[in-house]
Image (cartoon, grey):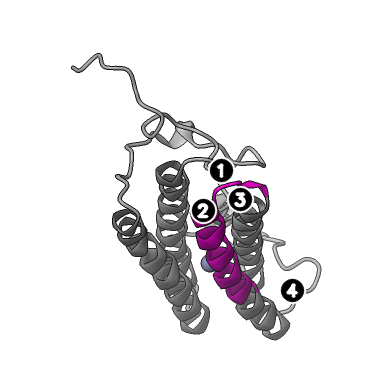
Amino acid sequence: MSDHALTGEDRPGDGLSDLADFLAHALHLENEAADHYEELADAMDAHNNREVAALFERLGGFARQHAAEVPTHAAAHGCTLPPRHPWEFHWPTGATPETPLRDHSHYLMTPHHALTLALEAERLGQQYYQWVATETGHDTIRALATDMAAEESEHVAILEDWLTRYPAPAPGWDDDPDPAHMPE
Ligand code: ZN
């Protein structure tokens, strides 16, 4: 155990003033989004919707790629990604932007439902990066966050388009006469 005090670059912050800290936020957000998209893709596969499963695999792939680019950004700017516990991040809304993607437990989840959760998560991701870009006084953070916000805007547009093809199901879609016999 080292008892040396954490320097400014190591200390968890709000992601607005220290590049390594912002990149740690981005890495966490993108990896979590990728993990949850993979789970959502599996759920859609289980509901025999290969088309929507493939979309989620694609969106998860974008998130994974963004995560993979984070160490490159860090290296390009000569900083080291600090280790972080999930509870050490500061999110302006109090929750990780990908949180809506966790809510996929409903065993009768429809493609519309799943696409709506994904749209909400992408919007929160876009708003997060936009918030950073607006609030930071750090030029490199602003430039990276602006790019990331633009990419999330593209994902929002993709999902808005897909939702027009999967409108809300009719009321009563989740009436289940015998839930006990439904497989998980
Ligand atoms: Zn995205």
Asked if one can make out residue 111 in the rendered structure from this viewpoint, the answer is no
Provide the residue designation for mark 2. Answer: 141
Badges 1 and 2: C-beta atoms under 8 Å apart?
Answer: yes
- Mark 1 or mark 2, earlier in chain: 1
Q: Amino acid at mark 3?
A: Val
- Mark 3 or mark 1, earlier in chain: 1
| Residue 23: x %, y % from top left | 42, 50
Query: Does the stretch in magenta take in 139?
Result: yes
How many residues crowd mark 2 within 10 Å: few (<14), some (14–19), many (20+)? Answer: many
Badges 3 and 1: C-beta atoms under 8 Å apart?
Answer: yes
Q: Amino acid at mark 1?
A: Leu
Provide the residue designation for mark 1. Answer: 16
Question: With respect to residue 65, does 105 lie above or below?
Answer: above
Q: Locate residue 142 relative to residue 62 in the image: left or right.
A: right
Badges 4 and 1: C-beta atoms under 8 Å apart?
Answer: no
Asked whether mark 3 lies closer than 8 Å to ligand 1, one says no
In this orientation, which residue lies closer to the viewer: 54 or 18? 18
How many residues crowd mark 4 within 10 Å: few (<14), some (14–19), many (20+)? Answer: few
Residue extending farthest right: 171
* Residue positioned 68% across, 53% down in the render: 134
How many residues crowd mark 1 within 10 Å: few (<14), some (14–19), many (20+)? Answer: some
Give SS at disc 2: helix
Quadrant of the rendering where the N terminus is positioned: top left
- Viewer-side label of 2, 4: 2
Q: Find the magenta span and give its range.
A: 135-156
Provide the residue designation for mark 4. Answer: 169
In this orientation, which residue lies closer to the viewer: 159 or 126? 126
Question: With respect to residue 131, does 59 lie above or below?
Answer: below
- Viewer-side label of 4, 1: 1
- Mark 4 or mark 3, earlier in chain: 3
* Residue positioned 60% across, 46% down in the render: 137
Q: Amino acid at mark 2?
A: Ile
